[in-house]
Image: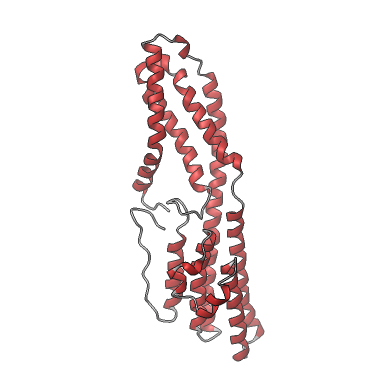
């Protein structure tokens, strides 16, 4: 996630530079053809451009709102994961009278979930292997949904500990409710991951943006003359930028600068949990070049 506004603007300009350069060259060719080679048919009505542009803006607005809602919903559910992990640690300290293995397992769960949402095997990550108890690593080794396997093992460990300490069933159910809330949040995150935005929302805005960039100079060349490339490039940049923003927000879990900073949030969860058992081995992950990963 880009946290530096200047970095975000620079990234947008960098990603749009190549298509803008192509657009500028195309605009110059249209102007040269109209001014030097007297190709007067290059001067076309602005009506088609205005109609297509109006429809495209409405379509992009709907698509971008939908993409942002997906991104923001994912962030809300990650907030739920964070809060429930902290609540679980508090319950372990107050009800189970501290159980370090459970704290380690829950911290490892957050990391495992972040790698799972990116389609990776969490056991190949140092962050997971260093903190997740070995018994749980062995249990989830061949499982497709490793975070779910961790929750199952945590639930089993909580049940064992409750029986050994003769903890009242009502207190046990409080901890089990937290695990259920974590499972619900994970399921919501997986739903977002496994249900991508419709292909029409991915391809149609880009196609229409390219079409309008091609016909744009024909509606400007008579009015703007030699400065047509500047006006056309500016308008084209707005359409390309809107399309780019929507594409960047479609998948909140990919490894782009625009995705959720899941590694940073997982590290924060680890720090918060381990502090409850007086361990301070990790530091928050700083942003790199204005990007939080």
User: Which quadrant holds the C terminus?
Assistant: bottom left
Whether residue 253 appears in this view of the structure is yes
Q: Position of residue 248 (x, y in %)?
A: 48, 46
Q: Please give the name of the residue rendered at 43% of the width and 77% of the height, measured from the top-left corner.
A: 274
Q: How is the image coloured?
A: secondary structure
Q: Please give the name of the residue rendered at 40% of the width and 57% of the height, measured from the top-left corner.
A: 292
Q: Is residue 50 above or below residue 168?
A: above
Q: Is residue 162 above or below residue 225?
A: below
Q: Position of residue 203 (x, y in %)?
A: 56, 38
Q: Quadrant of residue 164?
A: bottom right
Q: Quadrant of residue 25?
A: top left
Q: Report the side of 43 relative to 289 (left or right).
A: right
Q: Which residue is the extreme one toward the front?
A: 142
Q: Which residue is the extreme one toward the right?
A: 169
Q: Position of residue 133 (x, y in %)?
A: 50, 79
- Say how many tags the image has: 0
Q: Is residue 51 above or below residue 106?
A: above
Q: Position of residue 109 (x, y in %)?
A: 52, 70
Whether residue 175 appears in this view of the structure is no
Nearest the viewer among 129 and 227 is: 129
Q: Please give the name of the residue rendered at 50% of the width and 81% of the height, measured from the top-left corner.
A: 101
Nearest the viewer among 168 and 245 is: 245
């Amino acid at each position: 996630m880009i946290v530096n506004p200047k970095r975000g603007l620079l990234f947008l300009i960098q990603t749009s530079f190549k298509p803008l350069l192509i657009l500028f060259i195309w605009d110059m060719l249209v102007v040269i053809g109209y001014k030097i080679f007297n190709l007067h048919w290059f001067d076309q009505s602005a009506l088609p451009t205005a109609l297509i542009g109006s429809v495209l803006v409405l379509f992009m607005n709907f698509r971008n709102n939908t993409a942002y809602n997906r991104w923001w919903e994912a962030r809300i559910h990650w907030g739920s994961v964070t809060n429930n992990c902290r609540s679980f640690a508090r319950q372990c300290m107050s009800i189970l009278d501290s159980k370090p293995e459970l704290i380690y397992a829950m911290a490892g769960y957050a990391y495992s979930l972040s790698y799972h949402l990116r389609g990776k095997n969490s056991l190949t990550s140092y962050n997971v292997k260093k903190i997740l108890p070995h018994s749980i690593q062995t249990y989830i080794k061949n499982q497709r949904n490793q975070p779910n396997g961790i929750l199952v093992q945590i639930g089993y460990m909580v049940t064992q500990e409750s029986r050994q300490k003769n903890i009242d069933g009502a207190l046990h159910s409080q901890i089990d409710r937290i695990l259920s809330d974590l499972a619900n949040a994970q399921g919501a995150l997986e739903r977002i991951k496994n249900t991508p935005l419709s292909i029409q929302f991915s391809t149609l805005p880009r196609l229409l943006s390219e079409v309008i960039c091609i016909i744009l100079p024909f509606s400007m060349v008579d009015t703007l003359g030699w400065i047509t490339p500047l006006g056309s490039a500016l308008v084209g940049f707005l359409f390309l930028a809107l399309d780019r923003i929507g594409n960047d927000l479609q998948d909140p879990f990919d490894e782009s600068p625009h995705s959720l900073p899941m590694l940073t949030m997982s590290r924060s969860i680890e720090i918060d949990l381990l502090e409850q058992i007086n361990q301070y081995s990790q530091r928050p992950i700083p942003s790199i070049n204005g990007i939080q990963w």
